[in-house]
Image (tube, coloured by chain):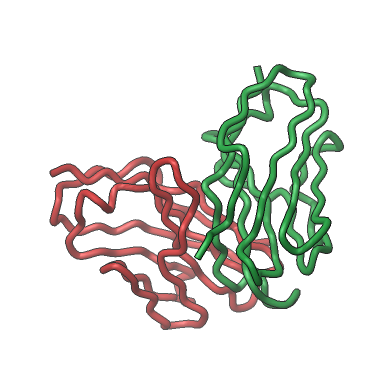
Chain colours: A green, B red
Amino acid sequence: DAGVIQSPRHEVTEMGQEVTLRCKPISGHNSLFWYRQTMMRGLELLIYFNNNVPIDDSGMPEDRFSAKMPNASFSTLKIQPSEPRDSAVYFCASSLGDRASIIHQPQHFGDGTRLSIL
Amino acid sequence: GNSVTQMEGPVTLSEEAFLTINCTYTATGYPSLFWYVQYPGEGLQLLLKATKADDKGSNKGFEATYRKETTSFHLEKGSVQVSDSAVYFCAPAGNNRLAFGKGNQVVVIP
């Protein structure tokens, strides 16, 4: 079975440019999570969706970050404009559960997008 | 909210040695507790979980017991292999949040 698919695997771009990260969750999963991983801060939850609706976006660092989930099989995380401090590995994860139980369910992670902003 | 404390620093040990990684957490109520593992260049994978006090999660020779009285969920393996080299994350789930620890890098040398 296909796992969570993220693209691109690597992205290098100059500061000020728009960056779009993409995620396809596991088929049938109804919850999707975006994380950022850095050496300094570890793994941080940015936002999560349940049934395509954003439930908690309190981890989104600032207005430069936005996330959408137009349908059950696709989500994007956009950074505009990008800054060097946004350099990190961004992970998408998916799981199955209702709104009350989703955080108690195992999450399935993609292999991440390594983003470098020059 | 939830928080988790994992022991500081990487862990280096020889093949077939005993591994313990300590994890303590703070959370209200009865959180579910998870250990995730991250191999180089990959995303996190669920290693094991426990959902209530005194439950023992186990997988691939790893074990962890949900200790509510000490708010701990220490990870153990009796005999590690080189293939266990990875970063291990403890994560309590409660208050609508899954909180990951900083992770512990484990290096197993032949």
Question: From what the image shows, is residue B89 above or below residue B95?
Answer: above
In the image, taking residue B93 as reference, residue B89 lies left or right, namely left
- Count of numbered circles on the image: 0
Is residue B75 visible in this depiction of the protein?
yes
Point 77% across, 44% down: residue: A60
Specify the quadrant that holds the N terminus of chain B: bottom right
Question: From what the image shows, is residue A7 above or below residue A58?
Answer: above
Point 73% across, 23% down: residue: A83
> Can you give x and y, in whole percent of width and height, for residue B74 in the image?
37, 64
> Can you give x and y, in whole percent of width and height, for residue A6 in the image?
61, 47
Point 22% across, 46% down: residue: B108
Single out the residue that lies furthest toward the front. A1
In the image, taking residue B77 as reference, residue B91 lies left or right, namely right
Q: Quadrant of residue A62?
A: top right
Question: From what the image shows, is residue A71 above or below residue A30?
Answer: above
Single out the residue that lies furthest toward the right. A63
> Can you give x and y, in whole percent of width and height, for residue A106 in the image?
55, 69
Q: Quadrant of residue A113?
A: top right
Point 40% across, 44% down: residue: B8
Identify which residue, B81 or B99, lies in the foreground: B81
Specify the quadrant that holds the C terminus of chain B: top left
> Can you give x and y, in whole percent of width and height, for residue A117 in the image?
66, 22
Identify which residue, B29 or B51, lies in the foreground: B51
